[in-house]
Image (spheres, helix red, strand yellow):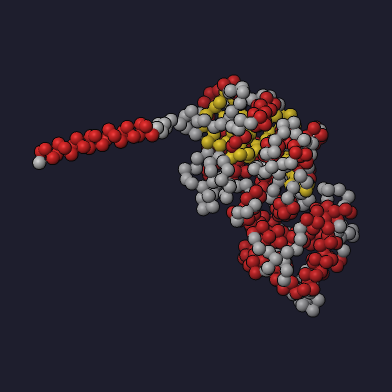
Amino acid sequence: MFEQTFKNIDDLLYKDSGADSELDYIGQTSWVMFLRYLDELEQDKADEAELKGEEYNFILDKEYRWPNWAMPKGADGKLDHHVALTGPDLVQFVDGKLFPYLAKFKQEADSANTIEYKIGEIFSELKNKIQSGYNLREILEYADELPFRASTDKHELSHLYESKIKNMGNAGRNGGQYYTPRPLIRAMINVINPHIGEKIYDGAAGSCGFLCEAYEYMYERMEKTTDNLKTLQEETLYGKEKKNLAYVIGIMNMILHGIEAPNIIHTNTLGENIRDIQEKNRYHVILANPPFGGKERPEVQQNFDIKTGETAFLFMQHFIKSLKTGGRAAIVIKNTVLSNTDNASVALRKLLLEGSNLHTILDLPGGTFTGAGVKTVVLFFQKGEPTKKIWYYQLDPGRNMGKTNPLNDKDMEEFVELQKYVTSSAVERSRLETEKSWILNVIDLDEDTFDLSPKNPNTPEEEPLRSPEVILAEMGRLDTETNTILQSIKELI
């Protein structure tokens, strides 16, 4: 039922002249779903207050609540067409009154950690792109059918929403930046193993896939006490996101996963001077896939000790600085960070190796990220002790990966299982040497470059390609042999 509802909404958006891509579809679906969710949340709180004999103060004024502007219903429980806005009147209300009213909450909220602030942030950044009030009326009716109250309903909705995010990434353009394959995220979290009491951070949150999966991982494993649930909801998951649409999608994704008021800040993470990061700003765990290939302006580069225009390299410095001593990180980054010979790349590798234990490097195959031709690796490190040994694992699912053959959880099983032995005794560590994996002693690195390129010593070396001179000489020899054989045949005849 839910899947068909989403499809129906997409079909209407496709027909509308204001929304013309997967990115627009999910953005417009998100603001409608958010207001539908907010109504359910307010109704739940009002019911709870009534049971206690208390009065609930609604966040939204009466005119702007879902049952009054979106779905006014008659005594029969059906939409009252005499009262409900539609056509140009509906679009005029949404654009001229609803969005400006909701946007004001950003200035009026007590703090950034409140649902009121999230309301204001979302409606300051998004615009209604649905131009036909008749299409919008139908979309509102479909959204009204989506139930948010039961946990099973939320679970199904969150899966459908994740599928929409994945489709947005597959659609190309800049959508790919929002989607990291969930099997990869789950494997990274499994290795890091976060637990209650730790603060988890993603400074390039995107659609909040890392934070949502971390929430699921911790929720399944923790003792279900009131204190633990409150800690997980309010004091565990933190993120920052620069892009408007990604911020809204991330907030909605976390809400659908059961996080009522996500601690996501809409800001340019790289605009923060890393020299200002204090202990109170640091985290126990960092999980991230920062954007790469971007170029930051000189004034942004001044916020960092190692100056470079490469976005991903600046994020790496931010993450290292934002990690508590003893804190753990798993970061997806393009593989050139391991081998580039420019001063910034060498300095970054030196910083990482000397200030953290870079214990594991996961080398990912091409096609892991749909639509992105860049080769990537995952760096697993713990801040504090310097690196002495690095375990490399080259992931090889045995097939070409892409849209039709995406990464799956089974592909990651061997890596996750073997990785457990990285911190084990010498005897158990022997299991880490396979055809796909090996251990590098940092003492053997070239101290001028600190080149960390994956060079598998356990793979049989291929014969080197022959030079043109050798090939021509071989062709000449074969021609001579052929002519000799033909001459012999002629003489026999």
Residue 463 image-quadrant placement: top left
Residue 402: % across, % down: 53, 50
Above or below: residue 20 compared with residue 313: below
Above or below: residue 245 compared with residue 299: below
Quarter the N terminus occupies: bottom right
**Would you say 415 lies left or right of 12 here?**
left
The residue drawn where x is 59% and y is 20% is: 443
Above or below: residue 353 compared with residue 121: above
The residue drawn where x is 27% and y is 33% is: 477
The residue drawn where x is 74% and y is 60% is: 31
The reply to whether residue 110 is in sight is: yes
Residue found at the very far left of the displayed protein: 493
Residue 84: % across, % down: 79, 74
Residue 127: % across, % down: 76, 61
Quarter the C terminus occupies: top left
Residue 287: % across, % down: 68, 40
The reply to whether residue 46 is in sight is: no
Residue found at the very far top of the displayed protein: 443
